[in-house]
Image (cartoon, rainbow, N blue to C red):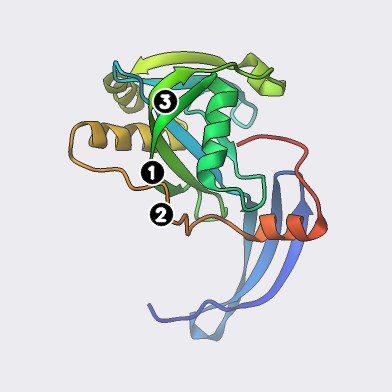
Amino acid sequence: MSHDFTVTDSHLLVDAPILALRRDRLAMPGGREADREIVEHFGAVAVVALDADGRVAMVEQYRHSVGRRLLELPAGILDIHAEPELDTAKRELHEETGLAADEWAVLVDLVTSPGFAEEAVRVFIARGLRNVERPAAEDEEADMDLSWVPLDEARAEVMRGEIVNSIAVAGILAAGEVEAGRAKPRGTDEPFTLRPTSLAERRAAQGAVPDMKRI
């Protein structure tokens, strides 16, 4: 448990607009070295937006990786260098649902695929919702539908395998704990220490910005 997994070499294999792939060589216990491929990512935010009736705003979006539309939380990548996570969450909620919120808190942080990817996501809970003008949508978001699902029903859909997006699963179940009084959300000023930095810092140094907005 005390071994230091030092990186002895590193190579960038793929550099795409919203992610990159690198290969690190690590010093392993016992004196060996081994390669590990890592998907670099900007990190992301998502929002459990609850209305006064206890319904959560869900979006249905086509995901080409699985070839189907998935029920998800409003979400987006942290593709603006050093932008506060809350600012990104507010913008994504506005753009994907046409909603703004008066009350915000941190619901849960998660690492989506720690075996090979840097992606970490901060999920917020938002209340005090109001309608605002939604900007024109593009690409997959132009095909996105918004629905209001009672939180208890959303939890049931998770358990029936109908909501399978991992961020939505985590957010819905965590919101259920908060609404039941078994947990409390955290303040929005708590640092997001899991936020990835390698891709964002390299792009910032290059003066480059991603040309696709996806999570």
Circle 1/circle 2 CB separation < 8 Å? yes
Kindly report the distance in space between the C-alpha atoms of the residues bearing marks 3 and 1.
Answer: 21 Å
Q: Is residue 84 visible?
A: yes
Task: Say the numbered circle drawn on residue 106.
Answer: 1
Residue 183 picture quarter = top left
* Picture coordinates of residue 17, whole percent (x, y): 76, 44
Residue type, label 2: Glu
* Picture coordinates of residue 79, whole percent (x, y): 66, 44
Residue type, label 1: Val
Residue picked out by circle 2: 190
Residue type, label 3: Ile
* Location of the C terminus (image quadrant): top right
First reached walking from the N terminus: tag 3 or tag 2: 3
First reached walking from the N terminus: tag 3 or tag 1: 1
Residue picked out by circle 3: 163
SS for callout 1? strand
Q: Residue at x 54, y 19 (%)?
A: 98
First reached walking from the N terminus: tag 1 or tag 2: 1
* Picture coordinates of residue 149, whole percent (x, y): 37, 16
Q: Is residue 69 visible?
A: no
Q: Residue at x 49, y 84 (%)?
A: 30
